[in-house]
Image: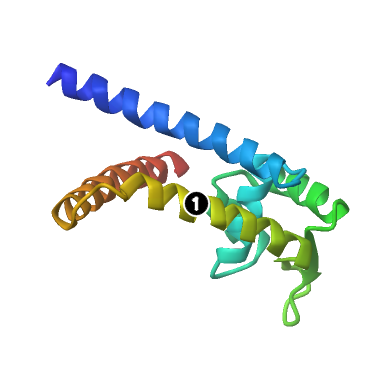
Amino acid sequence: MDYTKHTLNELLVGMFNYILYIEEKNLKKQGVKLSMNEVHLLESIEKASDNTMSHIAKRSMVTQGTLTTNVKSLVKKGYVERYKDEKDGRIVRLKITQPAKEVLRIHDSFHDEMIDKAVEHLNLQEDKLLISSLENILDYFSEEYAQHLD
């Protein structure tokens, strides 16, 4: 079992590092002048069911202060707009701009190609087993993350 744990750790850490590195290089090659953190923040804003600052911070797994700093930078660069909630002016909401949508199109295209290449040699049985295993791993990380919020 030690071999399995060691190998799984190496695979997860290695994949994470390679994906971030290759993703960042691809974005730079496509002319995107944002960090991976900034791109992933744009993605969080776009996909959020609630576009309030507090919800985006939680979804992005950052503090409100960190989000505020990052959002200021993205507003200045023209990728995010802040606006007050119509019903409660104390609530600040976020939305991405058209240039951000283009960055996310490039980002999504990279992910589509990456996943296509990663699974092109798997068969249906392997796909189901892989997805089930990865869902279990994600569930573990999600539960661990939730415990550290308290």
| Residue under numbered circle 1 | 111
Give the residue at x 56% y 32%: 21
Viewed as shown, does residue 5 lie left or right of 108?
left
Q: Nearer the viewer, residue 53 or 34?
A: 34
| Residue situated in front as seen by the camera: 123 or 101 | 123
Specify whether 81 is left or right of 103: right
Residue 8 lies, with reference to residue 38, above or below; the image says above
Q: Secondary structure at mark 1?
A: helix
Answer left or right for 106 relative to 85: left
Q: Residue at x 54, y 50 (%)?
A: 110
Image-based side of 143 in relation to 40, left or right: left
Q: Where, by quadrant of the figure, is residue 27 drawn?
A: top right
Q: What number of labels is visible? A: 1
Instruction: Name the amino acid, label 1.
Output: His
Q: Residue at the right extreme?
A: 76
Image location of residue 118, percent across then percent down:
36, 45
**View extreme (front): residue:** 121
Q: Is residue 112 above or below residue 66?
A: below
Residue found at x 55% / y 56%:
109
- Identify the image quadrant of the C terminus: top left
The figure's colour scheme reads rainbow
Residue 130, given in percent of the width and then of the height, sits at 22, 47
Residue 11 at x, y percent in the picture:
33, 28
Q: Splitting the image into 4 quarters, where does residue 108 fall?
A: bottom right
**Residue under the image location 74 percent in, 43 percent down:** 34
Task: Locate residue 15, reporting x and y percent.
Answer: 41, 33
Quadrant containing the N terminus is top left
> Pointer 1: residues within 10 angstroms few (<14), some, or many (20+)?
some
Q: Nearer the viewer, residue 118 or 143?
A: 118
